[in-house]
Amino acid sequence: MPTSFAASPPVAPMIPRTLFGPDHEAFRSTVRRFFEEEIVPNHDRYEAQHYVDREAWKKAGELGLLCCTMPEQYGGSGVDRLYSTILFEEQARVGASGVGFGLHSDIVANYLLNFGTEDQKRRWLPIMATGEIITAIAMTEPGTGSDLQAITTTAVADGDDYVVSGAKTFITNGLLCDMVIVAVKTGEVSSGAQGTSLLLIEADRAGFTKGKPLDKVGMRAQDTCELFFDGVRVPRSNLLGGVEGQGFLMLMRELAWERMIIAVTCVAGAEAALATTVDYTKRRKAFGKPIASFQNTRFKLAELRSEVQIGRVYVDRCLELVLEKKLDVAAAAAAKYWCSDLLSRVVDECVQLHGGYGYMLEYPIARAYIDGRANRIYGGTNEIMKDIISRTL
Ligand SMILES: Cc1cc2nc3c(=O)[nH]c(=O)nc-3n(C[C@H](O)[C@H](O)[C@H](O)COP(=O)(O)OP(=O)(O)OC[C@H]3O[C@@H](n4cnc5c(N)ncnc54)[C@H](O)[C@@H]3O)c2cc1C
Protein backbone atom coordinates (compact mmCIF):
# COMPACT_ATOMS: atom_id res chain seq x y z
CA MET A 1 0.00 0.00 0.00
CA PRO A 2 1.53 3.42 -0.89
CA THR A 3 1.83 5.55 2.24
CA SER A 4 2.73 8.69 0.33
CA PHE A 5 2.20 10.01 -3.17
CA ALA A 6 5.97 9.87 -3.54
CA ALA A 7 5.87 6.05 -3.55
CA SER A 8 4.17 5.93 -6.99
CA PRO A 9 6.05 6.45 -10.25
CA PRO A 10 5.19 9.79 -11.90
CA VAL A 11 3.04 9.94 -15.03
CA ALA A 12 5.21 11.36 -17.82
CA PRO A 13 3.95 14.67 -19.20
CA MET A 14 2.46 14.49 -22.72
CA ILE A 15 4.09 17.85 -23.45
CA PRO A 16 7.63 18.18 -22.08
CA ARG A 17 8.25 21.09 -19.71
CA THR A 18 10.78 23.69 -20.79
CA LEU A 19 10.95 25.97 -17.75
CA PHE A 20 13.81 24.55 -15.75
CA GLY A 21 17.58 24.45 -16.30
CA PRO A 22 20.21 22.16 -14.74
CA ASP A 23 20.60 24.40 -11.67
CA HIS A 24 16.88 24.23 -11.02
CA GLU A 25 16.94 20.45 -11.33
CA ALA A 26 19.87 20.18 -8.90
CA PHE A 27 17.87 22.27 -6.46
CA ARG A 28 14.86 20.02 -7.05
CA SER A 29 16.93 16.98 -5.99
CA THR A 30 17.81 18.68 -2.70
CA VAL A 31 14.19 19.71 -2.10
CA ARG A 32 12.88 16.25 -2.96
CA ARG A 33 15.32 14.59 -0.59
CA PHE A 34 14.37 17.05 2.16
CA PHE A 35 10.64 16.37 1.82
CA GLU A 36 11.06 12.61 1.51
CA GLU A 37 13.52 12.25 4.39
CA GLU A 38 12.56 15.03 6.82
CA ILE A 39 8.87 15.67 6.27
CA VAL A 40 7.11 12.53 4.98
CA PRO A 41 8.25 10.24 7.84
CA ASN A 42 7.00 12.79 10.40
CA HIS A 43 3.83 14.04 8.74
CA ASP A 44 1.44 11.76 10.66
CA ARG A 45 2.90 13.05 13.90
CA TYR A 46 2.61 16.64 12.68
CA GLU A 47 -1.05 15.98 11.88
CA ALA A 48 -1.66 14.65 15.39
CA GLN A 49 -0.02 17.67 17.05
CA HIS A 50 -1.41 20.15 14.45
CA TYR A 51 1.93 21.76 13.70
CA VAL A 52 5.25 21.06 11.99
CA ASP A 53 8.29 20.84 14.30
CA ARG A 54 10.46 23.94 14.50
CA GLU A 55 13.45 21.64 13.84
CA ALA A 56 12.05 21.00 10.34
CA TRP A 57 11.99 24.77 9.72
CA LYS A 58 15.58 25.07 10.92
CA LYS A 59 16.72 22.18 8.71
CA ALA A 60 14.99 23.81 5.74
CA GLY A 61 16.81 27.03 6.61
CA GLU A 62 20.18 25.26 6.78
CA LEU A 63 19.59 23.83 3.29
CA GLY A 64 18.68 27.24 1.86
CA LEU A 65 15.04 26.25 1.32
CA LEU A 66 13.54 29.26 3.13
CA CYS A 67 13.31 32.73 1.56
CA CYS A 68 15.57 31.57 -1.27
CA THR A 69 14.39 34.32 -3.64
CA MET A 70 15.44 37.06 -1.21
CA PRO A 71 18.65 38.94 -2.08
CA GLU A 72 21.83 37.54 -0.55
CA GLN A 73 22.32 40.66 1.58
CA TYR A 74 19.12 39.70 3.43
CA GLY A 75 20.04 36.03 3.90
CA GLY A 76 18.49 34.58 0.74
CA SER A 77 20.12 33.14 -2.37
CA GLY A 78 18.80 35.75 -4.81
CA VAL A 79 17.36 33.08 -7.11
CA ASP A 80 14.33 33.34 -9.41
CA ARG A 81 10.79 32.28 -8.60
CA LEU A 82 11.18 28.95 -10.35
CA TYR A 83 13.07 27.88 -7.23
CA SER A 84 9.99 28.69 -5.16
CA THR A 85 7.91 26.85 -7.75
CA ILE A 86 10.07 23.76 -7.23
CA LEU A 87 9.50 23.95 -3.48
CA PHE A 88 5.72 24.12 -3.96
CA GLU A 89 5.74 21.31 -6.53
CA GLU A 90 7.83 18.97 -4.40
CA GLN A 91 5.71 19.67 -1.33
CA ALA A 92 2.55 18.86 -3.31
CA ARG A 93 4.18 15.78 -4.83
CA VAL A 94 4.47 14.17 -1.40
CA GLY A 95 1.17 15.58 -0.12
CA ALA A 96 2.89 17.41 2.76
CA SER A 97 -0.04 19.76 3.31
CA GLY A 98 1.08 20.90 6.75
CA VAL A 99 4.24 22.71 5.80
CA GLY A 100 3.81 26.50 5.86
CA PHE A 101 7.20 27.45 4.41
CA GLY A 102 5.64 29.00 1.31
CA LEU A 103 3.59 31.58 3.15
CA HIS A 104 6.65 32.58 5.18
CA SER A 105 9.12 32.66 2.25
CA ASP A 106 6.99 33.75 -0.68
CA ILE A 107 4.37 35.97 0.88
CA VAL A 108 5.56 37.49 4.18
CA ALA A 109 9.18 37.90 2.98
CA ASN A 110 8.00 39.68 -0.18
CA TYR A 111 6.05 42.23 1.87
CA LEU A 112 9.19 43.02 3.83
CA LEU A 113 11.39 43.14 0.74
CA ASN A 114 8.99 45.23 -1.35
CA PHE A 115 7.82 47.66 1.31
CA GLY A 116 9.87 47.30 4.49
CA THR A 117 12.21 50.03 5.68
CA GLU A 118 15.88 49.10 5.51
CA ASP A 119 15.83 48.45 9.28
CA GLN A 120 12.82 46.16 8.97
CA LYS A 121 14.43 44.17 6.15
CA ARG A 122 17.71 43.79 8.02
CA ARG A 123 16.01 42.87 11.24
CA TRP A 124 13.63 40.21 9.93
CA LEU A 125 14.67 38.71 6.59
CA PRO A 126 17.98 37.06 7.63
CA ILE A 127 16.43 35.26 10.62
CA MET A 128 13.46 34.23 8.49
CA ALA A 129 15.87 32.66 5.99
CA THR A 130 17.56 30.54 8.66
CA GLY A 131 14.27 29.35 10.13
CA GLU A 132 15.16 30.96 13.43
CA ILE A 133 11.78 32.65 13.34
CA ILE A 134 8.48 31.67 11.74
CA THR A 135 6.13 34.27 10.30
CA ALA A 136 2.48 34.65 9.35
CA ILE A 137 0.17 37.19 7.75
CA ALA A 138 -3.16 38.01 9.36
CA MET A 139 -5.86 39.68 7.30
CA THR A 140 -9.01 37.60 7.82
CA GLU A 141 -11.20 38.35 10.85
CA PRO A 142 -14.09 36.41 12.35
CA GLY A 143 -16.49 38.91 10.76
CA THR A 144 -14.84 39.41 7.37
CA GLY A 145 -12.64 37.61 4.86
CA SER A 146 -13.41 38.37 1.23
CA ASP A 147 -14.35 41.96 2.06
CA LEU A 148 -10.99 43.01 3.49
CA GLN A 149 -11.88 46.69 3.57
CA ALA A 150 -14.33 45.84 6.34
CA ILE A 151 -11.71 44.71 8.88
CA THR A 152 -12.20 46.15 12.34
CA THR A 153 -8.86 45.49 14.04
CA THR A 154 -7.61 48.93 15.03
CA ALA A 155 -4.17 50.41 15.66
CA VAL A 156 -4.61 53.69 17.52
CA ALA A 157 -1.60 56.00 17.73
CA ASP A 158 -0.50 56.76 21.30
CA GLY A 159 2.84 58.53 21.70
CA ASP A 160 5.54 56.46 20.00
CA ASP A 161 3.29 53.40 19.89
CA TYR A 162 0.16 52.02 18.32
CA VAL A 163 -2.33 50.25 20.55
CA VAL A 164 -3.79 47.29 18.68
CA SER A 165 -7.18 45.73 19.45
CA GLY A 166 -9.07 43.09 17.53
CA ALA A 167 -9.01 39.46 16.43
CA LYS A 168 -7.89 37.53 13.36
CA THR A 169 -8.82 34.01 12.34
CA PHE A 170 -7.74 31.14 10.07
CA ILE A 171 -4.11 32.29 10.29
CA THR A 172 -1.62 29.88 8.73
CA ASN A 173 1.54 29.44 10.88
CA GLY A 174 -0.51 31.20 13.58
CA LEU A 175 0.48 28.96 16.48
CA LEU A 176 4.23 28.95 15.85
CA CYS A 177 4.64 32.44 14.44
CA ASP A 178 7.20 34.68 16.14
CA MET A 179 6.17 37.67 14.06
CA VAL A 180 2.99 38.34 12.15
CA ILE A 181 2.11 41.03 9.64
CA VAL A 182 -1.31 42.24 10.71
CA ALA A 183 -3.77 44.22 8.56
CA VAL A 184 -5.14 46.98 10.79
CA LYS A 185 -7.11 50.17 10.52
CA THR A 186 -4.92 53.13 11.44
CA GLY A 187 -7.74 55.36 10.22
CA GLU A 188 -11.42 55.17 11.18
CA VAL A 189 -12.88 51.65 11.04
CA SER A 190 -15.20 52.96 8.33
CA SER A 191 -12.31 54.39 6.29
CA GLY A 192 -12.03 51.31 4.02
CA ALA A 193 -8.89 50.83 1.97
CA GLN A 194 -7.48 54.31 2.71
CA GLY A 195 -7.34 53.61 6.44
CA THR A 196 -5.69 50.19 6.16
CA SER A 197 -2.06 49.66 7.21
CA LEU A 198 0.20 46.67 7.81
CA LEU A 199 1.88 46.34 11.19
CA LEU A 200 4.66 43.93 12.20
CA ILE A 201 3.74 42.42 15.56
CA GLU A 202 6.09 40.21 17.58
CA ALA A 203 4.45 37.24 19.28
CA ASP A 204 5.84 38.06 22.72
CA ARG A 205 4.12 41.46 23.05
CA ALA A 206 1.84 41.80 26.08
CA GLY A 207 -1.82 41.38 25.18
CA PHE A 208 -1.14 39.23 22.08
CA THR A 209 -2.53 35.72 22.52
CA LYS A 210 -3.05 32.77 20.21
CA GLY A 211 -5.93 30.32 20.12
CA LYS A 212 -5.54 26.55 19.86
CA PRO A 213 -4.98 25.20 16.34
CA LEU A 214 -8.36 25.16 14.63
CA ASP A 215 -9.95 21.77 14.01
CA LYS A 216 -9.84 21.78 10.22
CA VAL A 217 -11.34 19.22 7.82
CA GLY A 218 -7.92 18.65 6.23
CA MET A 219 -4.41 20.15 6.21
CA ARG A 220 -4.36 18.96 9.79
CA ALA A 221 -0.60 19.35 10.23
CA GLN A 222 -0.82 23.07 9.45
CA ASP A 223 -1.03 25.30 12.51
CA THR A 224 -4.01 27.44 11.61
CA CYS A 225 -5.09 29.64 14.52
CA GLU A 226 -7.06 32.55 15.83
CA LEU A 227 -4.99 35.52 17.06
CA PHE A 228 -6.20 38.00 19.66
CA PHE A 229 -4.93 41.53 20.26
CA ASP A 230 -6.03 43.10 23.51
CA GLY A 231 -4.52 46.58 23.78
CA VAL A 232 -1.16 45.39 22.38
CA ARG A 233 1.43 48.20 22.37
CA VAL A 234 3.53 48.14 19.22
CA PRO A 235 6.18 50.77 18.42
CA ARG A 236 5.42 52.99 15.42
CA SER A 237 8.69 51.77 13.90
CA ASN A 238 6.88 48.44 13.31
CA LEU A 239 4.58 50.01 10.72
CA LEU A 240 5.51 48.27 7.45
CA GLY A 241 7.27 50.81 5.25
CA GLY A 242 6.72 53.50 7.87
CA VAL A 243 3.71 54.99 6.09
CA GLU A 244 0.07 54.78 7.19
CA GLY A 245 -2.80 53.98 4.83
CA GLN A 246 -0.72 52.04 2.29
CA GLY A 247 -1.78 48.56 3.47
CA PHE A 248 -4.25 47.89 0.69
CA LEU A 249 -1.84 48.91 -2.04
CA MET A 250 0.79 46.67 -0.46
CA LEU A 251 -1.65 43.75 -0.35
CA MET A 252 -2.34 44.19 -4.08
CA ARG A 253 1.27 44.24 -5.28
CA GLU A 254 2.01 40.50 -5.23
CA LEU A 255 -1.50 39.18 -5.77
CA ALA A 256 -0.67 37.56 -9.11
CA TRP A 257 2.24 35.62 -7.60
CA GLU A 258 0.30 34.67 -4.47
CA ARG A 259 -2.41 33.17 -6.66
CA MET A 260 0.12 31.39 -8.84
CA ILE A 261 1.49 29.69 -5.72
CA ILE A 262 -1.92 28.05 -5.27
CA ALA A 263 -2.22 27.16 -8.96
CA VAL A 264 1.27 25.60 -8.98
CA THR A 265 0.47 23.59 -5.86
CA CYS A 266 -2.86 22.40 -7.27
CA VAL A 267 -1.50 21.23 -10.62
CA ALA A 268 1.36 19.39 -8.93
CA GLY A 269 -1.13 17.88 -6.47
CA ALA A 270 -3.36 16.76 -9.35
CA GLU A 271 -0.36 15.16 -11.09
CA ALA A 272 0.50 13.29 -7.89
CA ALA A 273 -3.11 12.14 -7.41
CA LEU A 274 -3.19 10.86 -10.98
CA ALA A 275 0.13 9.02 -10.56
CA THR A 276 -0.95 7.25 -7.38
CA THR A 277 -4.25 6.27 -9.01
CA VAL A 278 -2.66 4.89 -12.17
CA ASP A 279 -0.39 2.83 -9.92
CA TYR A 280 -3.30 1.63 -7.78
CA THR A 281 -5.57 0.66 -10.64
CA LYS A 282 -2.81 -1.43 -12.23
CA ARG A 283 -2.35 -3.39 -9.02
CA ARG A 284 -5.93 -3.73 -7.78
CA LYS A 285 -7.90 -6.60 -9.29
CA ALA A 286 -11.65 -7.09 -9.69
CA PHE A 287 -13.42 -9.81 -11.66
CA GLY A 288 -10.04 -11.48 -12.22
CA LYS A 289 -8.28 -8.55 -13.88
CA PRO A 290 -6.67 -5.23 -12.95
CA ILE A 291 -9.28 -2.49 -12.65
CA ALA A 292 -7.02 -0.46 -14.98
CA SER A 293 -8.15 -2.74 -17.80
CA PHE A 294 -11.84 -1.70 -17.58
CA GLN A 295 -12.82 0.79 -20.23
CA ASN A 296 -14.37 3.11 -17.65
CA THR A 297 -11.09 3.26 -15.72
CA ARG A 298 -9.02 3.85 -18.85
CA PHE A 299 -11.32 6.57 -20.12
CA LYS A 300 -11.48 8.30 -16.75
CA LEU A 301 -7.69 8.24 -16.41
CA ALA A 302 -7.32 9.47 -19.98
CA GLU A 303 -9.64 12.40 -19.24
CA LEU A 304 -7.80 13.24 -16.03
CA ARG A 305 -4.41 13.02 -17.71
CA SER A 306 -5.60 15.36 -20.45
CA GLU A 307 -7.08 17.90 -18.04
CA VAL A 308 -4.03 17.89 -15.80
CA GLN A 309 -1.78 18.37 -18.84
CA ILE A 310 -3.86 21.29 -20.07
CA GLY A 311 -3.67 22.89 -16.61
CA ARG A 312 0.08 22.30 -16.50
CA VAL A 313 0.69 24.07 -19.82
CA TYR A 314 -1.33 27.12 -18.74
CA VAL A 315 0.47 27.31 -15.40
CA ASP A 316 3.90 26.94 -16.97
CA ARG A 317 3.13 29.73 -19.42
CA CYS A 318 1.97 31.92 -16.51
CA LEU A 319 5.24 31.15 -14.75
CA GLU A 320 7.17 32.38 -17.78
CA LEU A 321 5.21 35.60 -17.48
CA VAL A 322 5.99 35.74 -13.73
CA LEU A 323 9.70 35.66 -14.59
CA GLU A 324 9.17 38.49 -17.08
CA LYS A 325 7.07 40.37 -14.47
CA LYS A 326 4.23 40.45 -16.99
CA LEU A 327 1.59 38.21 -15.43
CA ASP A 328 -1.59 40.18 -14.87
CA VAL A 329 -3.95 39.68 -11.97
CA ALA A 330 -6.84 38.32 -14.08
CA ALA A 331 -4.69 35.62 -15.72
CA ALA A 332 -3.41 34.61 -12.27
CA ALA A 333 -6.97 34.61 -10.88
CA ALA A 334 -7.97 32.27 -13.73
CA ALA A 335 -5.04 29.98 -12.87
CA LYS A 336 -6.02 29.96 -9.19
CA TYR A 337 -9.69 29.19 -9.63
CA TRP A 338 -9.36 26.75 -12.53
CA CYS A 339 -6.47 24.75 -11.08
CA SER A 340 -8.01 24.50 -7.61
CA ASP A 341 -11.27 23.31 -9.20
CA LEU A 342 -9.19 20.91 -11.31
CA LEU A 343 -7.55 19.47 -8.21
CA SER A 344 -10.94 18.86 -6.59
CA ARG A 345 -12.32 17.16 -9.75
CA VAL A 346 -9.26 15.00 -10.25
CA VAL A 347 -8.99 13.92 -6.64
CA ASP A 348 -12.71 13.13 -6.45
CA GLU A 349 -12.47 10.84 -9.51
CA CYS A 350 -9.30 9.26 -8.12
CA VAL A 351 -11.05 8.49 -4.82
CA GLN A 352 -13.79 6.76 -6.81
CA LEU A 353 -11.24 4.64 -8.69
CA HIS A 354 -9.76 3.55 -5.35
CA GLY A 355 -13.16 2.23 -4.19
CA GLY A 356 -13.49 1.90 -0.40
CA TYR A 357 -9.76 2.33 0.10
CA GLY A 358 -10.09 5.81 -1.35
CA TYR A 359 -12.09 6.73 1.73
CA MET A 360 -9.46 5.48 4.19
CA LEU A 361 -7.10 8.10 5.53
CA GLU A 362 -4.13 5.75 5.42
CA TYR A 363 -4.28 6.11 1.63
CA PRO A 364 -2.70 9.30 0.25
CA ILE A 365 -5.64 9.88 -2.07
CA ALA A 366 -8.02 10.19 0.90
CA ARG A 367 -5.68 12.75 2.49
CA ALA A 368 -5.60 14.65 -0.79
CA TYR A 369 -9.41 14.67 -0.78
CA ILE A 370 -9.61 16.48 2.56
CA ASP A 371 -6.46 18.58 2.12
CA GLY A 372 -7.14 19.98 -1.35
CA ARG A 373 -10.55 21.52 -0.71
CA ALA A 374 -9.23 24.62 1.03
CA ASN A 375 -7.48 25.78 -2.15
CA ARG A 376 -10.84 26.91 -3.52
CA ILE A 377 -11.38 29.04 -0.41
CA TYR A 378 -8.12 30.68 0.67
CA GLY A 379 -5.98 33.11 -1.31
CA GLY A 380 -9.27 34.78 -2.32
CA THR A 381 -12.25 32.47 -2.91
CA ASN A 382 -12.87 31.17 -6.40
CA GLU A 383 -15.97 33.36 -6.61
CA ILE A 384 -13.81 36.43 -5.94
CA MET A 385 -11.42 35.20 -8.67
CA LYS A 386 -14.30 35.11 -11.15
CA ASP A 387 -15.36 38.58 -10.06
CA ILE A 388 -11.83 39.84 -10.82
CA ILE A 389 -11.82 38.17 -14.24
CA SER A 390 -15.30 39.47 -15.09
CA ARG A 391 -14.18 43.04 -14.44
CA THR A 392 -11.68 42.75 -17.31
CA LEU A 393 -14.39 42.00 -19.88
C1 LIG B 1 -6.82 26.59 5.70
C2 LIG B 1 -6.97 28.08 5.63
C3 LIG B 1 -5.86 28.89 5.79
C4 LIG B 1 -5.99 30.28 5.75
N1 LIG B 1 -4.89 31.07 5.99
C5 LIG B 1 -5.05 32.42 6.10
C6 LIG B 1 -3.96 33.24 6.48
O1 LIG B 1 -2.82 32.77 6.67
N2 LIG B 1 -4.17 34.57 6.64
C7 LIG B 1 -5.40 35.14 6.43
O2 LIG B 1 -5.52 36.34 6.59
N3 LIG B 1 -6.46 34.37 6.06
C8 LIG B 1 -6.31 33.03 5.89
N4 LIG B 1 -7.37 32.24 5.54
C9 LIG B 1 -8.68 32.87 5.35
C10 LIG B 1 -9.14 32.92 3.91
O3 LIG B 1 -8.35 33.79 3.15
C11 LIG B 1 -10.63 33.31 3.94
O4 LIG B 1 -11.33 32.22 4.52
C12 LIG B 1 -11.17 33.63 2.58
O5 LIG B 1 -10.62 34.82 2.07
C13 LIG B 1 -12.72 33.77 2.58
O6 LIG B 1 -13.14 34.62 3.59
P1 LIG B 1 -14.31 34.15 4.59
O7 LIG B 1 -13.92 32.84 5.15
O8 LIG B 1 -14.60 35.26 5.52
O9 LIG B 1 -15.57 33.90 3.66
P2 LIG B 1 -16.63 35.01 3.20
O10 LIG B 1 -15.93 36.20 2.69
O11 LIG B 1 -17.63 35.16 4.29
O12 LIG B 1 -17.32 34.25 1.98
C14 LIG B 1 -18.36 33.27 2.15
C15 LIG B 1 -18.89 32.92 0.74
O13 LIG B 1 -19.42 34.10 0.12
C16 LIG B 1 -18.80 34.27 -1.13
N5 LIG B 1 -18.64 35.70 -1.44
C17 LIG B 1 -18.16 36.69 -0.64
N6 LIG B 1 -18.11 37.85 -1.29
C18 LIG B 1 -18.61 37.62 -2.54
C19 LIG B 1 -18.82 38.41 -3.70
N7 LIG B 1 -18.51 39.72 -3.72
N8 LIG B 1 -19.33 37.80 -4.81
C20 LIG B 1 -19.62 36.49 -4.80
N9 LIG B 1 -19.44 35.68 -3.75
C21 LIG B 1 -18.93 36.23 -2.63
C22 LIG B 1 -17.43 33.62 -1.01
O14 LIG B 1 -16.89 33.30 -2.27
C23 LIG B 1 -17.78 32.39 -0.18
O15 LIG B 1 -18.29 31.39 -1.02
C24 LIG B 1 -7.26 30.86 5.53
C25 LIG B 1 -8.37 30.04 5.32
C26 LIG B 1 -8.24 28.67 5.38
C27 LIG B 1 -9.46 27.81 5.17
Image (cartoon, rainbow, N blue to C red):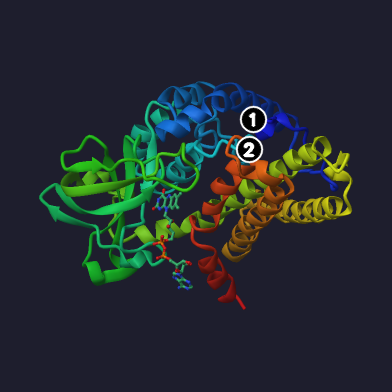
SS state under label 2 = helix
Residue closest to the eye, 231 or 130: 231
Q: CA distance from mark 1 to mark 2?
A: 6 Å
Q: Position of residue 294 (x, y in %)?
A: 88, 49
Relative side of 334 to 102, left or right = right
Residue closest to the eye, 7 or 108: 7
Q: Is residue 304 above or below residue 210?
A: below
Q: Is residue 383 above or below residue 53?
A: below
| Furthest residue toward front | 287
Which residue occupies 50% across, 45% down?
218
Give amino acid for label 1: Thr
Q: Are the residues tagged 1 and 2 within 8 Å (C-beta)?
A: yes
Residue closest to the eye, 297 or 132: 297
Badge 1: residue crowd in 10 Å (few <14, some 14–19, many ≥20): some
SS state under label 1 = loop
Give amino acid for label 2: Pro
Q: Is residue 198 above or below residue 86?
A: below
Q: Position of residue 21 (x, y in %)?
A: 75, 34
Q: Which residue is mark 2?
A: 364
Residue closest to the eye, 326 or 380: 380
N-terminal of the two: label 1 or label 2? 1
Image quadrant in which you'd find residue 280: top right
Quarter of the rendering occupied by the C terminus = bottom right
Q: Quadrant of ligand 1?
A: bottom left
